[in-house]
Amino acid sequence: INLDAPMAELGRKYKWHTGPCLLDALDSLPEASRPTDKPLRLCISDVYKRMGLGVTVAGKIESGRILPGNRVLILPSNESAGVKGLEINKKPVHVAVAGENVEVGLGGVTAENLRPGQVLCHPRHPIPLAMKIKAQVFTLPSLRVPLVAGQQLTFHMHHLEEPCNVTKLLRIISKK
């Protein structure tokens, strides 16, 4: 595999390939947009206690930014906590922004009240809670049980797993 040598340097061996090497191709990709100007949304992937940070949650910031000293709202439990500290790759940081995986030390909350799947958000911009959602569902070809109204399933999103009921099938699209 050609990772970093320009194709011209490889001579006739790979004359069938006219594109860039892998690293040049990756470097040419557009930078991902990070919505740092939107309210904080951090999906909790893990909860534990650490020396220095105390009660700690880990997760990826989907939007916004977080700083030590901020107040955050934990949903759906509706608890409030203070941010004691932040670490990225085990190094303390003063700010973390959308797109980064971060460990957040929280004060004013116990680890027993936190679980993966919960969300940290800005207290003035809470995520609206929903009892019903409309979803587009794709099934694998190996599915042997038909998907029908009234069926109980497990809904997976980020690190959240919640039981749910299918109330209505609006449309069935088949590639057959």
Image (tube, grey):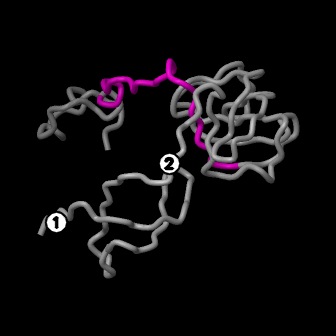
In this rendered view, identify the residue nearer to me: 43 or 74.
74
Pointer 2: residues within 10 angstroms few (<14), some, or many (20+)? Answer: few
Identify residue for label 2: 130
Is 85 on the left or on the right of 38, as rendered?
Answer: right
Highlighted range, magenta: 25-46
In this rendered view, identify the residue nearer to me: 36 or 73.
73
Is 126 on the left or on the right of 136, as rendered?
Answer: right
Residue 80 position in % (x across, y down): 75, 35
Residue sitting farthest toward the bottom: 144
Query: Which is in the foreground here, disc 1 or disc 2?
Result: 2
Residue 48 position in % (x across, y down): 78, 49
Residue type at mark 2: give it.
Ala
Quarter assignment of residue 96 = top right
Quarter assignment of residue 108 = top right
- Give the quadrant of the N terminus: top left
- Give the quadrant of the C terminus: bottom left
Quarter assignment of residue 22 = top left
- The residue positioned 50% from the left and 22% from the top of the image is 38
- The residue positioned 26% from the left and 72% from the top of the image is 141
- Give yes or no for residue 55 being in the magenta stretch: no
Q: How many marks?
A: 2
Residue 174's mark? 1
Residue 108's mark? none
In this rendered view, identify the residue nearer to me: 2 or 20.
20
